[in-house]
Image: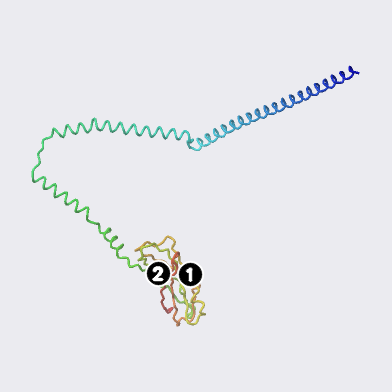
Amino acid sequence: MANDDNDDIFEDFETKVKGESKRSEFAEKELSEEELLKKKYREAERTLKEKHKKEKEALEKKRAEEMLKHGKVPTKKLDSIERIAYIAIIAVLVLYIIIDLSFYHGKNADAESEKPIAVTVGEEDNKTTETEKIEEKAEEKSPEEEKASEGAKQLSGKITLTIDNIYKNVAEDLNDTGYITNIVFTIDNDKDKVLTPVVNVYAYDSELDESWETRSRGQYTYSIGIKPGDKHTGSIDLVPKTWTNLNVEKNIRLTLNDTKSGFITAVNQKVIIS
């Protein structure tokens, strides 16, 4: 009976030892597979980095070739060229200063020291007079400069609009029909800033509908602008331009606006088409 118990104990121990051995083998196998996976990952990462590096170098090489093809210098080469150019300029300047100080100035100083000093009082007075005349002439302003300065000082600060001419005629075959075809005007900018004008023309008489008093028959815009102190002449073609009842006075009104500040001024003139 005692031997049976001992056998059972040994069998249990043997079973436990075999179980522990299997678990150890499984752990070692699992560990080796993990290491193998890490190794594969590192190799894949290294391969990817090398591939990226090669592609980047190929891309940079291609860009450099494209820049050279279009007459441009790559940045790295340009930096080195600029540094070489700066060094060369500095070297030339230093060499020039050394030569100038050691040769030309020294030679001129020796020559000046050897010259005899002989200046008469009359010559000195003449030199002084000529110098004074040159200084006075330099201080004098030309007529154009004086005119410009006076104009700049005398700006009135006003902008005026003037009707220069109203072109009109009568139809030869129809005595009761006439035309106002074109208006010529002048703008005088006497302000200290540039004027970009917009001019509208209105034409009406007492027999037309009142809406024509506010309905533009033509517009003129000068986008370049009129400088301070300058004048500008323009013209507007009227649409429509045909008129009846020629004995009735026609009102011609021009309005001047600035593209930035709005309405500035207006001018009116009455005419008879004849």
Given the current orientation, which residue lies at the most extreme front position?
2
Would you say 102 lies left or right of 178 here? left
Does residue 178 sit above or below 196 in this rendering? below
* Spot occupied by residue 162 in the image (x, y as percentages of width and height): 38, 71
The colour scheme of the drawn protein is: rainbow
Say which residue label 2 marks: 185
Would you say 81 lies left or right of 43 here? left
* Spot occupied by residue 97 in the image (x, y as percentages of width and height): 28, 33
> Residue 230, located in which quarter of the rendered image?
bottom left
The front one of 227 and 171 is 227
> Residue 169, located in which quarter of the rendered image?
bottom left
Does residue 67 sit above or below 43 in this rendering? below
Does residue 119 sit above or below 239 in this rendering? above
In the rendered image, which quarter contains the C terminus? bottom left
- Could you classify mark 1 by the number of other residues whose Cα lies within 10 Å: few (under 14), some (14-19), or many (20 or more)? some
> Residue 235, located in which quarter of the rendered image?
bottom left
Which mark, by number, is residue 218? 1
> Looking at numbered disc 2 in the image, what kind of residue is underneath it?
Phe
> Looking at numbered disc 1 in the image, what kind of residue is underneath it?
Gly
Given the current orientation, which residue lies at the most extreme right position?
1
The tally of labels here is 2
* Spot occupied by residue 34 in the image (x, y as percentages of width and height): 71, 28
